[in-house]
Amino acid sequence: MFQNLTDRLTKTLKNLRGQGRLSEDNIKDTLREVRMALLEADVALPVVKTFTEKIRQRAVGQEVLQSLTPGQALVKIVNEELVSLMGEACDELQLNVQPPAVVLMAGLQGSGKTTSTAKLARWLKERRRKNVLVTSCDIYRPAAIEQLQTLATEIDVAFFPSSAGQRPVEIAAAALDHARNHHIDVLIVDTAGRLHIDADMMDEIRQLHATVKPVETLFVVDSMTGQDAANTARAFDEALPLTGVILTKTDGDARGGAALSIRAITSKPIKFLGVGEKTAALEPFHPDRVASRILGMGDVLSLVEEAEHKVDKEKAAKLARKLNKGKRFDLEDFGDQLEQMMGMGGLGGLMDKLPGVGQLPQNVRDQVNDRELHRMLAIIRSMTAQERRFPDIIKGSRRRRIAAGSGNQVQDVNRLLKQFMQMQKMMKKMSKGGMKNMMRGLKGRMPQGFPF
């Protein structure tokens, strides 16, 4: 997300290097570029005008601190205005009510409501330790009911059954009674969507809202629709008291205009970002962190939080003990590292949060994808347990067998083994002299041929 905007802004702000002061002259062209970058990102025109005017008023004539270049000073201003535009702080779900707290999901058909319902249920279960019940009031699309039931089973949360022959209000009322009687903390109600906003749809969801009295009414919207997402959210808010927005499919939107427009147009906070298809691919929306990503400065805090929740601590501790005892890092360990990387959103998810990635050449970034990770894991899984523990025994005939078993070429196996040996050397350095020694050995470079 924001890749195009990040590229444009990073390039634009670089042009101010070497200037001693921010003035009307040297900022005029920069602001024009910023304006064009935002418009290309599909940010709503009124939002762009207000945003750039605020930057101009703050930046023009400002004395640059001795330790800063004008470019850095402007980055600071742009960063602060981006945070202000998107809402200052993370707006958390307000669930501090007598259980069950009801969350009502609203939105157009195809926006990702059902999947987002499951993602939110999983997030509440894993991150907030809540006992969650989900139900579907989408009687017009029986597949939606089945889909939610399947997802609920997958993430191991309770599902309240419904059918196409029932009335949505009856389903919601029955689910609420069930939640009360079974000590459920949070009830999430998935509602029907339409291909466009219509009176019947709004009447139905208003009735549902009056029946379950939700503490949170979340509007689920596809980020790929750009500024139209903000306009649709405003139309919904006029008919329904929304409390927040879930922006979906952000992993496939390189522009990011919806994220920058919604708060300004609707005054409703974005509460979550859908960052992939899997049920774990949901992130709380932190304006300051997103602003940092837009400006190519990464999002280390989110990366640390992701690692905290998704890295297998037992495996990590076991590997650390193994290395401290002087034992060799083997292909079993290498495979574990790759699998945990995939669990954190793959290379794309990690790269998006790493500082400085925006400075990499485009051809380098284009090579960063999860296809290579999947290939490497397939090769490792095609090995025997003995081969993973003792990689030195993998010679010609074994390499041919592993290549055939994983659907790859022998040269792919050779490349993986070369990458593994480089990683093995890194781990050896780390075990002998800690992280500092390892980084000194790397001299700022990743192992040659490694997929990131």
Image (cartoon, helix red, strand yellow):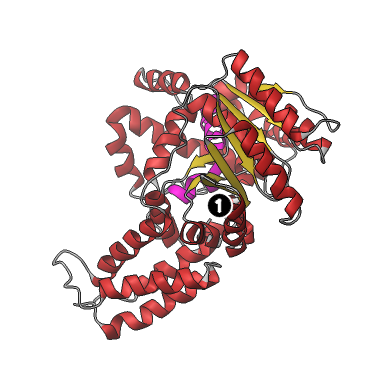
Compared to residue 82, the image places residue 93 above or below, namely: above
Magenta: main secondary structure equals helix
Q: Residue furthest left?
A: 66
Give residue 356's position: percent from left, percent from top. 39, 56
Residue type, numbered disc 1: Val
Q: Residue furthest right?
A: 165
Please name the residue shown 31% across and 79% down the image: 27
Please name the residue shown 19% across and 73% down the image: 62
* Front position in the image: 101 or 398: 101
Q: Is residue 409 magenta?
A: no
Please name the residue shown 57% across and 52% down the image: 237
How packed mark 1 is, by other alpha carbons closer than 10 Å (few <14, some 14-19, many 20 or more), is some
* Front position in the image: 289 or 107: 107
Give residue 219's position: percent from left, percent from top. 59, 47
Give residue 98's position: percent from left, percent from top. 48, 22
Q: Is residue 101 visible?
A: yes
* Front position in the image: 33 or 138: 138
Magenta segment boundaries in residue numbering: 331-353
- Kindly identify which residue carries mark 1: 368
* Element marked by disc 1: loop
Compared to residue 105, the image places residue 49 above or below, namely: below
Give residue 94's position: percent from left, percent from top. 45, 34
Image quarter of residue 142:
top right
Compared to residue 91, the image places residue 177 above or below, namely: above
Please name the residue shown 48% across and 24% down the image: 312
Image quarter of residue 157:
top right
Compared to residue 204, the image places residue 87 above or below, namely: below
